[in-house]
Amino acid sequence: MFKALLRIKLASLPSMLTGGAKRGKKRGKGMAVLYALLMVYVIGVFCWMFAGMFSMLAEPLHDAGLSWLYFLMTLILAFTLMVIFSVFTAKSQLYEAKDNDLLLSMPIPPSAILASRMMLLLGLNLVFGLIIVVPSLIEWYAVVPFSLSGLASFLLTFIALVFFAMSISALFGWLISLLTSKMRNKTLFETVLSLAFLGGYFYLCGKMGDVIENVLMSSMGLADTLGNIAILKCIGLAAAGESLTKLLLTLVVLIIPFIIVYAVLARTFIKTATAKRGAAKIKYVDRGQKVSSMHSALFKREAARFFSSSTCIINNGLGAVFMIVAAVALVIYKNEVSGFIAMFGDAGDIVMCIVAVFGAMMAGLVLPTSSSVSLEGRSLWLVRSMPVSTREVLDTKLKFSLTIYVPPVILLMAAAGYVLRPGALMLLASTVFSLLLLFVMAQIGLIENIRHPNLNWTTETQAVKSGVSVMISMLLDYGLIAALAFGGYELLKNGLAPALVMAIAAALMLILCLVLRSLLHGRVAARFENL
């Protein structure tokens, strides 16, 4: 039974990662290859980034006789990455899975259900950990003679760490599930917590250079600090293959918590899976009903779905957050930015062009329109049965996406204007260009989502993060931005004024807006009616 459940989980993994449809519908080979190439590219970028860091640490730490510190840092980074990226998956898979009732109604031991889910999570943890471990080993053995026993010791320690990370993810997943089960605004809490994780991750990435510098300059001090923590030094020595006794002790210490967690979850799985997780009761207050216009009702419907899902807020609203952060940073570091630009002479207008393109790049991460149709799911018939035209439905989806992103774009351009002090024509042209490019990308996202909808998703994550339309929209958006950047560079190189270049780009975007709008209200609208 365990093998059958595990096969089902593994068979659903590609669909979970790529947003594939259910009911036996398979993506074409070309799309599967495209997803595979994209995944290889993303993993390759992360491996390249960490390889650069480890290349600077391997030789100095080996020469200083601190091999154990090198491997300990590798394992700490791997552990952090595994926990950050698996804690919410553990929460949904172990405690809030939607197929609990179905599986528990079958003659299947609860321990088998739990084991199949934990094996899947262990596999995901292993993948995240290898993103750190593989470049670390490559850079280490590029400067140190290869040792089979040393490699075996490190791999055994790493595998034990995967189990330990799984136990920590399960614990934090349980705590988050327990906290949110009685919360009135569960979405807000999950959104803030997710943003905190992302913020911490980006902060660590930004400080990675300082961390490497401090390690190289005070490696002995860091070794003394970490060496005073017995368990950490034990793990480091075990991973470096310097002590068989410490290796055995490390394996025991790291694997026992997983065994305990699994035993507890197995004994309480039925109670956990069938627990009622009703939110805090809201006291009814009698208020008068307000009549809304048809357009207002559609808009509120889009807003309610967006703000009721932390997945939508995090993935579709991340670009807006980045733009707001960039605007605030420009104002706070005004003097530093002005001083840096002054080093290159009169480059304020050029930087203004860059800011306008940057805003578009942030908006192009994942616009809400690229998944707004997919999110209708199997209840698409509801909006199709309403006494509203297809044009009104699509225009509302477009308007809501622009409502999320237009204010941050204006804020970013206003902050850039305040700091860079460009001419009035330059500020106007760059702002209009950025807004029109945003409008173009929002229409591209909606058109692609109608052309490649995923209405049979199991979780919203499949529609929002990994749908085909999301990937194609992103590629088209960044392809358009790259073409505009190249064309603008050529025009600037030939002596055209930056304000004139931005005006030309804005005119092109206006023409493209009109073409896409005509297409959206024509053939694409007809396609939507036949979904």
Image (cartoon, helix red, strand yellow):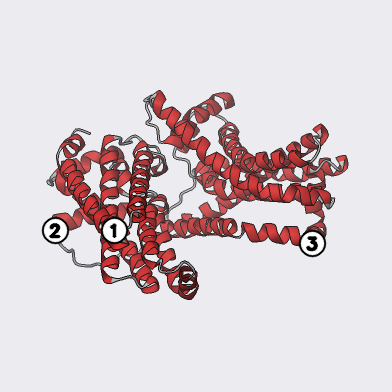
Residue 493 drawn at (x, y percent)? 37, 54
Q: Quadrant of the N terminus?
A: top right
The three-letter code of the residue at mark 2 reads: Ser
Residue 272 drawn at (x, y percent)? 54, 45
Mark positioned earlier in the residue sequence (2 or 3): 3
Q: Residue at x 69, y 50 (%)?
A: 76
Using the numbered discs, state the Cα–Cα distance from disc 2 to disc 3 in whole angstroms. 65 Å
User: Which residue has dot 1 on it?
Assistant: 502
Q: Residues within 10 Å of mark 2 (few under 14, many from 20)?
A: few
Q: Residues within 10 Å of mark 3 (few under 14, many from 20)?
A: few
Q: Is residue 266 left or right of residue 99?
A: right
Looking at the rendered image, the disc whose residue lies closer to the viewer, 2 or 3, is 3
The three-letter code of the residue at mark 1 reads: Met
User: Which residue has dot 2 on it?
Assistant: 293
Q: Residue at x 50, y 72 (%)?
A: 336
Using the numbered discs, state the Cα–Cα distance from disc 1 to disc 3 in whole angstroms. 55 Å
Q: Count numbered badges in the picture.
A: 3
- Which residue is at the front of the view, 15 or 98? 15
State the SS at label 3: helix
State the SS at label 2: loop
Looking at the rendered image, the disc whose residue lies closer to the viewer, 1 or 2, is 1
Mark positioned earlier in the residue sequence (1 or 3): 3
Using the numbered discs, state the Cα–Cα distance from disc 1 to disc 2 in whole angstroms. 38 Å
Mark positioned earlier in the residue sequence (1 or 2): 2
Looking at the rendered image, the disc whose residue lies closer to the viewer, 1 or 3, is 1
- Which residue is at the front of the view, 155 or 62? 62
